[in-house]
Image (spheres, grey):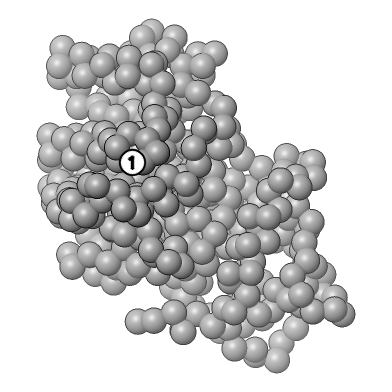
Amino acid sequence: MGQEKFIFEFSGKKVEKGTFQWSAPSNIALVKYWGKKEHQIPANPSLSFTLTNCKTITKLDFQLKEASGISFDLFFDGQPKEEFKPKIQKFLERIVNYCPYINDYHFIIHTENTFPHSSGIASSASGMAALAVNLMQLEQTLNPQMTVAYFDQKASFLARLGSGSACRSISGEAVVWGTHPEIAGSSDYFGVPFDAPLHPIFQDYQDVILLVDKGEKKVSSTVGHDLMHNHPFAQQRFEQAPVNLSKLKLALETGDLETFIAIVESEALTLHAMMMTSMPYFILMKPNTLQIIEQIWSYRSQFKVPLCFTLDAGANVHLLFPKKDREKVLEFVENTLAPLCQNGHYIVDEMGSGAQKMM
């Protein structure tokens, strides 16, 4: 199924002006996507958990205008944010063939995050997803016959063109992006909800994000992805990921926590190993990242609590565990791990269900 189905065909309906507001969550990849082809196509499939509290809230005001072309104003946390505009401009240019109606409107975009920007909590994922669902609501206004399934699929497709992982922030507790023979309907063009019931142990999984470093990353994810071209271990990695996804799929269905932990932690360390063995090489982990990992391993071994870590492209640590263990894990976080975080800060989050319409 190609991209052509996402090209908007004018219905004859127009709307003068309006306002929409949506939130879209961040997501944390368990099987990592690192490396991409042209047009934001992933080099390997990935699987993520959608979060709840770490999200972007975006309000979109739009007004019909006479001159055709892309035009918008952007505000972040209530202030004009000129440095963000080139990325939004590029995104709108990428999607205009699929959403030609954006040439007809001037947009005012107000956006804010509930978590630190550019610190490895996938702010570009939630930000682009939030903008994509707002634009899809405008499209739905122009085409009221649109189905919910098409709305979600095209929103994911559009979000991907802004930030690859953003396609996993539209819908579903667990989402797969990238073609995989064991995931029904999986595609390189958009994310799809995990196609089997999650075992009860995973249905309300918890994620405490330990904010080791809230500053901007020294190397952006875009640059990191590009360094996978000609990487000496890239091909082995691209072959490893779908195998790990198969193993993780079975673990999620059966409640196999031992396999879940092994795959998730291995994937996190592999992601950072790719960074450390690229040319030029770089390290996004900090000393306290490693200390936290060692503390997690020690706690798991001593108390037999099935908690594990994963990392995104940054220094912060995601601590994953079943909800039944929440009380004792939060005590461990407060007493042992928080002192290793910047200013003692961490975010308590849990699995969520995707983008939400707010107005």
Q: Quadrant of the C terminus?
A: bottom right
The residue indicated by pointer 1 is 278
- Most extreme residue toward the right is 66
Horizontal relation, residue 46 to residue 283: left or right: left
Horizontal arrangement in the rendering, residue 181 relative to residue 101 (left or right): left
Q: Residue at x 65, y 57 (%)?
A: 88
Q: Residue at x 54, y 43 (%)?
A: 123
Observer-nearest residue: 52 or 263? 263
Callout count? 1
| x, y percent for residue 130 | 58, 55
Place of residue 127 in the rendered image (x, y in percent of width and height, measured from the top left): 58, 50
User: For residue 324, which quarter of the picture?
Assistant: top left
> Which residue corresponds to the image point at 71% horizontal and 46% vertical from the top-left?
83
* SS category of the residue bearing label 1: loop
Give the answer, above or below, for where 198 lies relative to 144. Answer: above
Instruction: Locate the N terminus by quadrant.
Output: bottom left
Q: Is residue 145 depicted above or below 175 in this figure?
A: below
Horizontally, residue 316 falls left or right of residue 71, namely left
Question: What residue is drawn where x is 69% and y is 79%?
Answer: 101
Image height check: is 80 above or below 243?
Answer: above
Left or right, 319 with respect to 234, comes to right
In the image, 47 versus 193, the foreground residue is: 47
Label 1 crowd bin: few (<14), some (14–19), many (20+), radius 10 Å? some
Residue 326 seen by the camera: yes
* x and y percentages locating residue 75 in the rendered image: 76, 47
**Would residue 253 be visible to someone looking at this image?**
no
Residue closest to the eye, 58 or 81: 81
**Which x, y percent locates residue 306?**
20, 27
Circle 1: residue type: Ser
Outermost residue to the bottom: 12
